[in-house]
Amino acid sequence: MAVLYPRLSPADAVSLWESYASLTVKELCTRSSTSHPNQTFAAVGGRRIDGRELSDLQRSIRQIAESFGYPEKGSRGSLSEFDTAVSIFFGEHLDISEGEAYRPQTWAFISLVLLPDVVKWRFEGFGASRCTGGRRDCFHRLWLRAKAFDLGAGRDNRWIILKSLTEDSFVSIMERPSLAGSSDICRVLGATWMKVAASVGRNRMEDINRRAIKRVRGKATLIFLDALSYVELKSLVESCYLAAVDS
């Protein structure tokens, strides 16, 4: 049976974010909770998650954060490693249906009610987009990454792409719905990024990747990428990256 998570409406999310914006990590930790008076659930479709399960999720994420320096300010590298660790945790352990996970209201609850302190630690500026549930939300984006780059349970290298890509490469793919909407496209892009990086060096990949992604998006205006076979998609993406290397 699907697990239903609490939801926080956009109006309640903005109101809570405004009241929290000036608070410190430690202050937000004391304000965190496993419930909110205005929370709602889907009317049908599963069983409601209970407070103990939400507390377990809260504790698990905080423990991951602590391993990377929480509540003290983290380095850029440690914050990136935190993102990867949470993505893998979500991919392997988070019991959530796609119907629940694609709703911004679900992630607004997780970010603003359950773990606002961790959001503040991860994103010091605590911008609204990082905690109100959209694709740039602190935790929503990590679930999306896990879904996009998961090579499958049982694979020894299941999370190799997730562990290899840089923040810039994640953003270039995941913030473009025409690419992020297909796990096949994401995995091919990620695998090709790794292949090219191994050849030319990771320090060159930011510019190369941006040029390659532009080429892929240009091709997508003429070709329905989802209709291509894996071999055809791989060939198209690799040609775009090779052209970007030579340009």
Image (cartoon, helix red, strand yellow):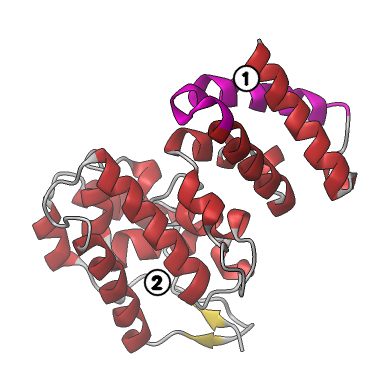
Prevailing secondary structure of the magenta residues: helix
User: What's the residue type where badge 1 is placed?
Assistant: Arg
Task: Mark 1 vs mark 2: give the one in front.
Answer: 1
Which percent across, then down, holds residue 217?
73, 28
Q: Nearer the viewer, residue 20 or 101?
A: 101
Q: Quadrant of residue 60?
A: bottom left
Residue 223 in the figure: left or right of residue 88: right
Which percent across, then down, holds residue 104?
50, 56
Q: Residues within 10 Å of mark 1 (few under 14, many from 20)?
A: some
Residue matched to label 2: 39
Name which residue lies at 38% across and 64% down: 109
Which percent across, then down, holds residue 162?
51, 52
Q: Nearer the viewer, residue 45 or 65?
A: 65
Q: Which residues are magenta?
A: 199-222
**Image height of 174 relative to 241, above or below:** below
User: What's the residue type where badge 2 is placed?
Assistant: Gln
Residue matched to label 1: 211
Q: Nearer the viewer, residue 247 or 8?
A: 247
The C terminus lies in quadrant: top right
Name which residue lies at 48% across and 85% down: 48
